[in-house]
Image (tube, rainbow, N blue to C red):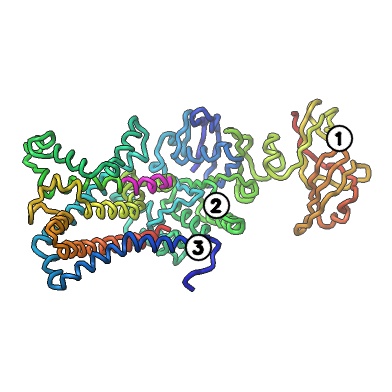
Amino acid sequence: MFRRRSAIPGFGLTLGITLTLLSVVVLIPLSAVALKAAGIGWDGFVAAGFSERAMRAYRLSFGAAFAAAAINGVFGMITAWALVRYQFPGKTVLNALVDLPFALPTAVAGIALVTLYQPGNLLGVWLDALHIKAAFNFTGVTIALTFIGLPFVVRTLEPIMRDLAADVEEAAASLGASRWQTVMRVVLPSLGPAWLTGFALAFARGVGEYGSVIFIAGNLPFKTEIAPLLIVIQLEQYEYGAAASIAVVMLLVSFAMLFVINAIQAYARRLAA
Amino acid sequence: MTISIRQVEKSFGRYPALGGVSLEIKDGELLALLGPSGSGKTTLLRAIAGLEFPDKGQIAFDAQDVTFAGAAERGVGFVFQQYALFKHMTVARNVAFGLDVRKGKAKPSKAAIAARVEELLNLVELGGLGKRYPSQLSGGQRQRVALARALAVNPRVLLLDEPFGALDATVRKSLRKELRRIHDATGVTTIFVTHDQEEALELADRVAILNHGVIEQVGTPAEVHDAPASPFVCGFVGEANRFEGEVSGGVFRAGGIGVAAPGVADGKAVAFVRPHEFVIAPAGFGAHIQRVTLQGPLAHVEAVTSDGIRLQIVASRADAANYAAGATANLTVRAAHVYPA
């Protein structure tokens, strides 16, 4: 039977509310997008959703989101480690700073970043000297997405790191493993599933990010135009069908990637249970 | 290998965990560190392992001073109460870990490691389960894996911290016998920590009893049970009735109960009487029998004297007829351990 008898209360109620809410706020709007895209026909959908300009925008959005999530994967892990493992002055402040990207209006972040990294400004001067351009290109987009994605990795890893039993590391040490071997072979592998969750969240957030990126991206069509911006541009030109087509492509790609990541996680979790 | 512990002290903040412990562990011996929680037994074991470092004193393996050597350098095998297995590795990879992390010439060939893993899994009777993950094993099986993993590196000493603490009673008993068998097969010097006196007495060659960070007595199970060195040991090891009374002229008295206490000075005293040391005697003190339960060859009797002192008595089934619930029996005490209070 689909529903087993159980002493745990609330199955019908919670599932009912979940499905209703999911339908109203997620599924129905998304299907409306798909319907809108279908409105311009298959040829229209392909022309709008797979145009040269759209393809470049996808590459930038997904590429920069992936790069940013990867950077956060490394530095977010180090940050989480420092926050969980050590006591140091200013820890509370640092802890609060990590969450700032969650709370800050993304436009503020975008303006702050462009002020810093623009050629001739603060950090920009130093980067100019190194012949690195960190605004109005792929690097700039990646910087913005790294900023907004950091807390996702840190906050998903923290509880798992805290729960890592000290005796496992002591066991590795007593078996003759060096500190490096203990970290590489015992600690990091057991963080795998949580790390992947953090990576996926940061990546998904990056793909959908709009506010902070448009300030630092430069927004040149075919060059530094992110996919969400392209959707907005289409909307401003009353090309609802084209906008919806791009949205559908992004939706499908994002869903496919998150689905694969979840499948990997489910597999890893089964081993770790 | 012999282990010498000399005047080891250790405190955590202001809380003293070990207050000057000295102990010699003989080569090939199976020694139990027995004590209540907070007695410092685990701290002592971890200091021997190199997972904790003494504030004062010295620890030597044979003639080599290892007081401040790290765990990785000591060549010890450590088994944790909660198994501490590597969850993301198969059973075989877990057991191989200690050999896998060796570098250069010290690292055995793949085939040699595989053979060693096979041999150890057979030793702990887990042959054929090498491809499983720890999550697919029962608690008892996980602890066997932990044991095999600790033995894989041919440790100079095997250390076990409450190894059976997380297991249910049946598994605990069978794993106890298993540990004894494995110890006899490998001959490795073994120290285990337990708060379960039955476990310590059954398994160990010698038992060291700790209380409040000091060793109260070290001896064979028979010695600590039959000749306890202190009131604490007497109360902690084996069952005992505790009576507070007075010694006068070599005789201990508490209410109607009297028992010989040779060599104990006159004055207030505490007597410990094992439950099997009560016998029926017409001239003895009277005790009201409250409850009789039969367990295998023994009868457990709960009684109370006319002075209101509660007694726990163990009699053989043959004697059980003398104890009837509700009736009064006349008893005397055959022997007791008496200590000045």
Residue B42, x across and y down, in percent? 53, 40
Please determine whether, in this image, residue B57 is positioned above or below residue B306: above
Of the residues shown, which amino acid type is indicated by label 2? Ala
Residue A134, x across and y down, in percent? 11, 43
Query: Do labels 3 and 2 touch, CB within 8 Å?
Result: no
Query: Do labels 1 and 2 touch, CB within 8 Å?
Result: no
Marks 3 and 2: which is nearer the front?
A: 2
Of the residues shown, which amino acid type is indicated by label 3? Glu
Marks 3 and 1: which is nearer the front?
A: 1
- Asked if residue B62 can be seen in this view, the reply is no
In this figure, which residue is indicated by the disc labeled 3?
A: B125
Pick the residue in front: B44 or A84: A84
Of the residues shown, which amino acid type is indicated by label 1? Gly
Residue A157 colored in magenta in the image: yes
- Chain ID of residue with mark 1: B
- Chain ID of residue with mark 3: B
Give the CA separation, mark 3 to mark 2.
Answer: 20 Å
In this figure, which residue is indicated by the disc labeled 2?
A: B166
Residue A151 colored in magenta in the image: no
Q: Which residue is drawn at the image coordinates 10% and 47% (left, top)?
A: A218
Give the CA separation, mark 1 to mark 2.
Answer: 43 Å
Q: Which residue is drawn at the image coordinates 17% and 40% (left, top)?
A: A111
Pick the residue in front: A173 or B69: A173
Residue B171, x across and y down, in percent? 58, 58
Magenta residue span: A154-165
In this figure, which residue is indicated by the disc labeled 1?
A: B255
